[in-house]
Image (spheres, grey):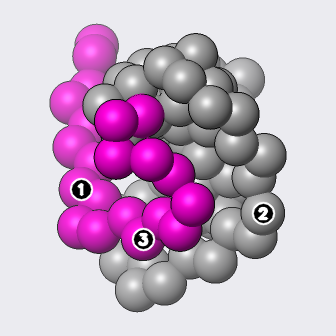
Amino acid sequence: MSRVLEVNIDRVVLRGIDSSDRKAMIEGLEAELTRILADPRSGGQKIQSSRTPVLKLGRIPLERGAAGGRKFGSGLARAIARGVKP
């Protein structure tokens, strides 16, 4: 039986990312969160409904361009997954 999981991220505050790289960053974030939450080994399916008002993730390396934006988004997704407790 498949489950439907809805993830709402109200706001992401980023300093130092060029607005032209934002779309690629969002694509990377969405793709990696989808992968993490769908993988039973990641524990993402055990996350319960909760509200996390602020999740400080620290520094994540940022390279310029669309590839760098996607890589940054993927790193952001992994940091979010680590920060949300199952």
Q: Are marks 2 and 1 in contact (CB under 8 Å)?
A: no
Looking at the rendered structure, the number of numbered marks drawn on it comes to 3
- Horizontally, residue 81 falls left or right of residue 31, namely right
Q: Nearer the viewer, mark 2 or mark 1?
A: 2
Report the magenta stretch's main SS.
loop
The residue stretch that appears in magenta: 1-21
Q: Secondary structure at mark 2?
A: loop
Rendered-image quadrant of the C terminus: bottom right
Neighbour class for label 3 at 10 Å: few (<14), some, many (≥20)? few
Mark linked to residue 13: 3
In the rendered image of this protein, does residue 67 appear above or below residue 20?
above
Badge 1 amino acid: Asn
Neighbour class for label 2 at 10 Å: few (<14), some, many (≥20)? few
Neighbour class for label 1 at 10 Å: few (<14), some, many (≥20)? few
Q: From the viewer's side, name the closer residue of 26 and 66.
A: 66
Residue at image point 34% right, 46% down? 19
Residue at image point 72% right, 23% down? 41
Residue 1 percent across, percent down from the top left: 28, 13
Mark linked to residue 59: 2
Q: CA distance from mark 2 to mark 1?
A: 22 Å
Q: Nearer the viewer, mark 1 or mark 3?
A: 3
Q: Which badge, 1 or 3, comes first in the chain's sequence?
A: 1
Badge 3 amino acid: Val
- Horizontally, residue 63 falls left or right of residue 72, namely right
Residue at image point 29% right, 59% down? 9
Question: Which residue does the numbered mark 1 point to in the structure image?
Answer: 8
Residue at image point 78% right, 46% down? 61
Would you say residue 26 sits in the magenta stretch?
no
